[in-house]
């Protein structure tokens, strides 16, 4: 048994699912950098597309069970912290995806087996492979096992850049992206003070100050998240 075959077998044990079509798991673990090695090797990008939707469904299902009285505005930020790239990369490490990845030699040498972006994409692809091979129950079993820690200790929006967090919230609510307008600039050139107003459709605008435009924008985004009960 080769090292990769051993890694695949170990990953199957970790997932708790023996694939009736092993090629599905193999494709889920094939990075685009390795897809040119053989005409028979397909990369995992299509699986990633499907797995993102499978993960989204399972996450929404579980949040509705855990928070039966929560409003959509409260569920959406929780949802995004569970399905974002950082959460998927952590889940991939719990699964043991890294050793089983098929990468190009160059990507392997550059540490691709531990890159968050590669792990996160592979994680979504693995969820698709489980769904295709064993149905939603197989995918749900993996979700329960590898997202349990994420559900028990949810990442806080405060750990994110507040502008990114506000953008995710606005998108989850079906609203346009936040807009930032410099209302005023005061003080001497060596110590300026910027006042920025942030606006989101359907939400009262809010202003905040900072020593730079970027700092003021972040302060305004954080203040809006706090006012809307998201921090």
Image (spheres, grey):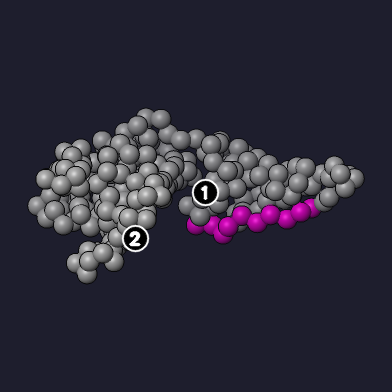
Q: In the picture, residue 43 is in which quadrant?
A: bottom left
* Residues tagged 2 and 1 counted as in contact (Cβ below 8 A): no
Left or right? Give the position of 231 relative to 130.
Answer: right
Residue at 30% from the left image edge and 44% from the top image edge: 98
Q: Position of residue 70 (x, y in %)?
A: 43, 38
In magenta, the rendered stretch is 174-183
Disc 2 is placed on an element classified as helix
When the figure is inspected, residue 23 is found, relative to residue 209, above or below; the finding is below
Q: Is residue 141 above or below residue 24?
A: above
- The residue carrying mark 1 is 169
Question: Is 132 included in the stretch rendered in magenta?
Answer: no
Q: Residue at x 27, y 50 (%)?
A: 101
Position in image of residue 214 (x %, y %)? 70, 48
Instruction: Determine the residue located farthest toward the top in the rendered image.
Output: 152
Residue 11 in view (yes/no): yes
Query: Along the line of sight, which residue is nearer the eye, 119 or 203?
Result: 119
Residue drawn at 42 percent across, 34 percent down: 154
| Rendering quarter of residue 86 | top left
Q: Position of residue 221 (x, y in %)?
A: 64, 45
Question: Where does the N terminus fall, quadrant-wise?
Answer: top left
> What residue would you read off at disc 2?
33
Q: Say whether disc 2 or disc 1 marks the residue closer to the N-terminus.
A: 2
Whether residue 67 sits left or right of residue 160 in the image: it is left
Q: Residues within 10 Å of mark 1 (few under 14, many from 20)?
A: many
């Amino acid at each position: 048994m080769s090292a990769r075959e051993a890694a695949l077998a170990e990953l199957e044990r970790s997932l708790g699912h023996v694939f009736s079509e092993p090629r599905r798991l193999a494709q889920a673990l094939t990075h685009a950098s390795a897809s040119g090695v053989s005409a028979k090797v397909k990369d995992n990008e299509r699986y990633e597309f499907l797995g993102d939707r499978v993960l989204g469904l399972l996450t929404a299902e579980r949040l509705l069970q855990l928070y039966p009285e929560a409003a959509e505005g409260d569920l959406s930020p929780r949802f995004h912290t569970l399905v974002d790239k950082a959460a998927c990369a952590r889940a991939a490490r719990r699964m043991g995806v890294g050793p089983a990845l098929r990468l190009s030699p160059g990507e392997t040498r550059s540490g691709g087996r531990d890159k968050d972006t590669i792990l996160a994409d592979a994680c979504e692809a693995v969820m698709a492979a489980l769904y295709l091979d064993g149905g939603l129950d197989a995918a749900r079993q993996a979700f329960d096992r590898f997202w349990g820690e994420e559900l028990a200790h949810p990442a806080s929006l405060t750990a994110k850049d507040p502008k990114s967090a506000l953008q995710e919230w606005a998108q989850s609510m079906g609203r346009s992206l936040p807009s930032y307008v410099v209302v005023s600039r005061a003080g001497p050139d060596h110590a300026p003070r910027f006042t920025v107003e942030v606006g989101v459709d359907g939400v009262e605008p809010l202003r905040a100050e900072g020593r730079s435009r970027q700092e003021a924008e972040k302060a305004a985004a954080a203040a809006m998240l706090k006012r809307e009960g998201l921090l």
